[in-house]
């Protein structure tokens, strides 16, 4: 990354203070009745015009969920959630249509968030040479607003390549065979408490299918926005990369500033077949609550990838700056021989934020490889935990893992914790794990201050350096955005 | 004969024995035992659903019914040769006739003096095995080294005799080093070849200001034994607690060490090796509590696994908010020699102070093929080459032992293990 300009830009953006995505869109909404029961599950399924098998699938998950207990093993602390005191379905009255017919209020919302829903014109007239001529690569966006997808751009262009990119509700209608085959195949209904809840009441999310041998010509992206009050968002994303295909997918999210805590319980499933490769990047910027720890999103998410095919590869990159509480462990099940899993993470816990995040790398196939790089930053009263599992099965001969977890502490009231689990049952596997915890060195700060940078700028610069290994894994546009976000998230943590 | 198995068997025994246990007439001790019995009775042996016992399953213990050890007649026991003036416990009972260390005292005979000292560090409600110990302990070592005194080297031998039915004993050792005192304590836990027993010792160790305790523990129990030990150590300002634990014997062994650094500039070294052969399960679990500023801790643990064995390492470093300028380091490494071995490792950092330097590392792997080839190419037979590489692997942990007697004992133990392994 050309460091200098971006860093200067990032440092300048520190002056934009606070959470600037905290506005609310005033739009006519339709809600399901408050509360959670079988009727609500039926209501959601009916709203989405779902086939019978999916309703049954949801009901089975709901029955399972009722027998399960909320997990308490993580390091995060919060008041009990009243699952009956929330809306499980909230959608703009005007249903999703083509891009041209989307409610202008919604378009303005996304513009304000910096997410272009309008497709850019291809500049050069030559068909097929579009992407080469276009200096800035277009990004196809699926915009999810509370419970529904309101628009998906560049669909036609992607269809030309045979790529399916749409909301999961639409995929249920148009490609039921694919959805039925893969939905729940990576994260089964009874996987955990929040996943079971999601299976019962999921409303929307993205669906991607990349056919054999296709390299997706543009970045695919979903932008999640929670807008309505007292709602929970239960997104469901399913990405399938067929043999030899490649796709890069980005995810972003924001929510208004409110004093109440809102629940976001998503499930993301990725499937990579032989020689396929999926790159999944997240910039998580849900409202983190105010400086006193009031409000903010509870982000309880299950993300898992199945590297089913030989030589398949899944790479998770996440920048976690938002949410009052993050509970999230994007994982890879490395089933195919020679498959590769990667996890790059930056997590910030400032003010009263709590983050308990990490990954699981389950090595089953021979010569499977995984890399974990996690950077945790704690400031204010924030508590940041890396929790990860590396498991090598008896048949994963020649498997290889490298894990590096670094924690940075800013201030003496925050906490940084590291809880890795390493389980090896294979003689020829090699596992390495290292973790460090430190604070910003006085000499580094002094060096920057001496060159005329303010304390805050200096900290920002050092933090960016600390995170560089992860940030460089992000697609260009996201990397710049993420860098700025880091700065803003740490505002007020020094001096 | 009482044949109730497992945890319930122990609870029954406690109910039957309560009024006859040493110190039963002391209200404070009876209350301590009563509380421990209550929590042990409620929890039983920990299951794998308990996070601290995720990798060590005590379920097999639940099917064994243990007997109370019989009081042995004098003589009739062949003990391993002494390495220093020693204190001897046979089947958990102090044997004055076999001990020759002048400072050795039986805990059971001094219980009335120990109010406010015994049970201060142990956490029977949190650690179920310490609960079982508190409930049923009958004896142990009571050792105090006076201010500024160099206690020299002392051996603590715990020996189990062969018995028709499995037996259980739960010694409680209470050790205190006054300010500026020093001591090397080398403990050997072993038993007759065919003995089947549960050895469940608990240690409460106080290292006062500026004192230094070197504590070597050689766990070489009989092959059919269960060894479950819990060490609690508290180190005051400027004190040093140096623990080396060899985990090599038994069918199932767990060494749990809880060390708290409660005074500024206290130091702690916890090192160890686990050497496992077919059919063994060994677990080393450490918890280090940095509660004061300017303290440092060093941990290096090495595990070598052969046959169908399973090794576990869990190590937690907690740095409290007051513990600024903490320097903490932990490394655990495992070497697999067999395709049937399994290693589980869970290092853990929990840090609430910002001006600290803490790190941990973990590696798992087999013998390096290149290194083996290098040695073979120079005419060294394969078994010898492997022995050299294993020795080199263990070197880092072993060389942390500065005290000569302990180092010698350790070298012999490692050597013995390797010979047994090569023969198998």
Image (cartoon, coloured by chain):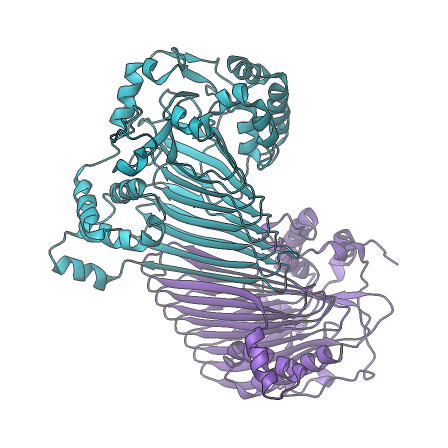
Residue A65 shown left or right of residue B292 in the figure: right
* Residue A84 drawn at (x, y percent): 51, 21
* Colour-to-chain, cyan: A
Decide: is A147 above or below A12.
above
Q: Residue at x 33, y 50 (%)?
A: A472
Q: Nearer the viewer, residue B17 or B164?
A: B164
* Residue A127 drawn at (x, y percent): 32, 30
Q: Is residue B53 visible?
A: yes
**Residue sitting farthest toward the left:** A452
Decide: is B90 above or below B201.
below
Q: Nearer the viewer, residue B266 or A375?
A: A375
State the count of labels. Answer: 0
Q: Which of the 4 image quadrants contains residue A407?
A: bottom left
Q: Is residue B87 visible?
A: no
Q: Nearer the viewer, residue B351 or B154?
A: B351
Q: Residue at x 59, y 73 (%)?
A: B367
* Colour-to-chain, purple: B
* Residue A373 drawn at (x, y percent): 42, 54
Residue A262 shown left or right of residue A8 in the figure: right
Residue B410 shown left or right of residue A456 in the figure: right
Decide: is B308 above or below B222.
above
Q: Nearer the viewer, residue A7 or A34?
A: A7
Q: Which of the 4 image quadrants contains residue B94?
A: bottom right
């Amino acid at each position: 990354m050309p460091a200098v300009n971006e860093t200067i830009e990032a440092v300048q953006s520190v002056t934009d203070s606070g959470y600037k995505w905290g506005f609310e869109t005033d739009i006519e909404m339709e809600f399901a009745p408050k509360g959670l029961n079988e009727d609500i599950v039926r209501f959601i399924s009916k709203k989405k015009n779902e086939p019978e098998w999916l309703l049954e699938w949801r009901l089975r998950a709901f029955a399972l969920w009722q027998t399960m207990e909320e997990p308490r093993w993580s390091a995060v602390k919060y008041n009990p959630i009243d699952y009956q005191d929330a809306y499980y379905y909230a959608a703009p009255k005007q249903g999703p249509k083509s891009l041209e017919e989307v409610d202008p209020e919604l378009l303005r919302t996304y513009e304000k968030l910096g997410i272009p829903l309008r497709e850019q014109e291809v500049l050069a007239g030559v068909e097929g040479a579009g992407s080469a001529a276009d200096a800035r690569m277009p990004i196809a966006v699926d915009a999810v607003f509370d419970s529904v997808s309101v628009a998906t751009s560049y669909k036609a262009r992607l269809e030309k390549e045979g790529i399916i990119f749409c909301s999961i509700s639409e995929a249920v209608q148009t490609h039921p065979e694919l959805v039925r085959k893969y939905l729940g195949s990576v994260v089964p209904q009874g996987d955990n408490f929040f996943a079971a809840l999601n299976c019962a009441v999921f409303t929307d999310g993205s669906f991607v299918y990349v056919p054999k041998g296709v390299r997706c010509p543009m970045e695919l992206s979903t932008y999640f926005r929670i807008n309505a009050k007292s709602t929970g968002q239960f997104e469901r994303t399913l990405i399938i990369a067929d043999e030899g295909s490649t796709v890069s997918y980005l995810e972003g999210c924001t929510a208004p500033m409110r004093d109440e805590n809102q629940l976001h319980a998503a499930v993301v499933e990725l499937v990579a077949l032989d020689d396929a490769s999926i790159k999944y990047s997240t910039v998580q910027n849900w409202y983190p609550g105010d400086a006193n720890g009031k409000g903010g999103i509870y982000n309880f998410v299950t993300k898992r990838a199945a590297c089913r095919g030989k030589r398949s590869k899944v790479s998770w990159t996440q920048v976690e700056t938002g949410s009052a509480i993050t509970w999230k462990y994007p994982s890879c099940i490395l089933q195919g021989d020679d498959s590769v899993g990667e996890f790059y993470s930056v997590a910030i816990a400032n003010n009263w934020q709590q983050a308990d995040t990490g990954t699981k790398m389950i090595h089953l196939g021979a010569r499977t490889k995984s890399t974990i790089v996690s950077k945790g930053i704690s400031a204010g009263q924030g508590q940041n935990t890396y929790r990860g599992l590396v498991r090598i099965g008896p048949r994963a001969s020649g498997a290889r893992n490298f894990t590096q977890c670094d924690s940075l502490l800013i201030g003496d009231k925050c906490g940084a914790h590291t809880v890795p689990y390493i389980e090896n049952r294979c003689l020829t596997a090699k596992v390495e794990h290292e973790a460090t915890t430190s604070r910003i060195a006085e000499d580094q700060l002094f060096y920057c201050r001496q060159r005329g940078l303010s304390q805050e700028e200096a900290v920002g610069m050092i933090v960016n350096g600390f995170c560089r290994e992860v940030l460089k894994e992000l697609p260009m546009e996201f990397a710049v955005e993420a860098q700025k976000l880091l700065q803003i998230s740490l505002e007020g943590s020094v001096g | 004969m009482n044949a109730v198995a497992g945890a319930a068997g122990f609870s029954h025994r406690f109910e039957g024995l309560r009024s006859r246990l040493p110190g039963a007439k002391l209200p404070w001790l009876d209350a301590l035992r009563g509380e421990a019995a209550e929590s042990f009775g409620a929890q039983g042996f920990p299951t794998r659903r308990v996070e601290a016992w995720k990798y060590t399953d005590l379920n097999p213990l639940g099917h064994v019914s243990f007997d109370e050890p019989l009081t042995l007649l004098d003589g009739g026991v062949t003990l391993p040769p002494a390495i220093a003036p020693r204190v001897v416990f046979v089947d958990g009972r102090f044997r004055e006739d076999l001990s020759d260390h002048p400072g050795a005292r039986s805990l059971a005979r001094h219980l009335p003096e120990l109010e406010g000292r015994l049970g201060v560090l142990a956490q029977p409600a949190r650690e179920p095995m310490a609960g079982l110990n508190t409930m049923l302990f009958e004896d142990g070592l009571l050792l105090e080294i006076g201010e500024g005194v160099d206690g020299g080297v002392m051996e603590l031998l715990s020996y189990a005799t062969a018995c028709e039915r499995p037996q259980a004993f739960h010694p409680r050792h209470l050790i205190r080093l006054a300010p500026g005192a020093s001591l090397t304590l080398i403990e050997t836990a072993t038993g007759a070849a065919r003995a089947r027993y549960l050895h469940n010792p608990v240690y409460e160790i106080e290292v006062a200001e500026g004192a230094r305790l070197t504590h070597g523990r050689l766990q070489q129990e009989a092959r059919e034994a269960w060894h479950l030990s819990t060490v609690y150590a508290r180190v005051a300002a400027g004190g040093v607690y140096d623990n080396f634990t060899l985990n090599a014997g038994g069918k199932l062994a767990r060494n749990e060490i809880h060390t708290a650094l409660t005074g500024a500039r206290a130091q702690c070294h916890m090192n160890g090796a686990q050497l496992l052969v077919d059919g063994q399960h060994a677990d080393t679990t450490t918890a280090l509590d940095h509660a004061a500023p300017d303290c440092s801790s060093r941990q290096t643990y090495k595990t070598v696994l052969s046959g169908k064995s399973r090794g576990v390492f869990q190590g937690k470093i907690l740095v409290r908010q007051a513990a600024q300028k903490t320097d903490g380091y932990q490394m655990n490494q495992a070497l697999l020699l067999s395709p049937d071995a399994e290693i589980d490792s869970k290092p853990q950092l929990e840090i609430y102070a910002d001006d600290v330097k803490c790190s941990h590392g973990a590696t798992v792997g087999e013998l390096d093929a290149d290194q083996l080839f290098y040695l073979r190419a120079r005419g060294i037979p394969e078994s010898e080459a492997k022995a050299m590489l294993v020795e080199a692997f263990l070197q880092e942990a072993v060389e942390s032992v500065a005290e000569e007697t302990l180092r010698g004992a350790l070298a012999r133990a490692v050597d013995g293990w390797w010979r047994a392994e090569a023969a198998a």
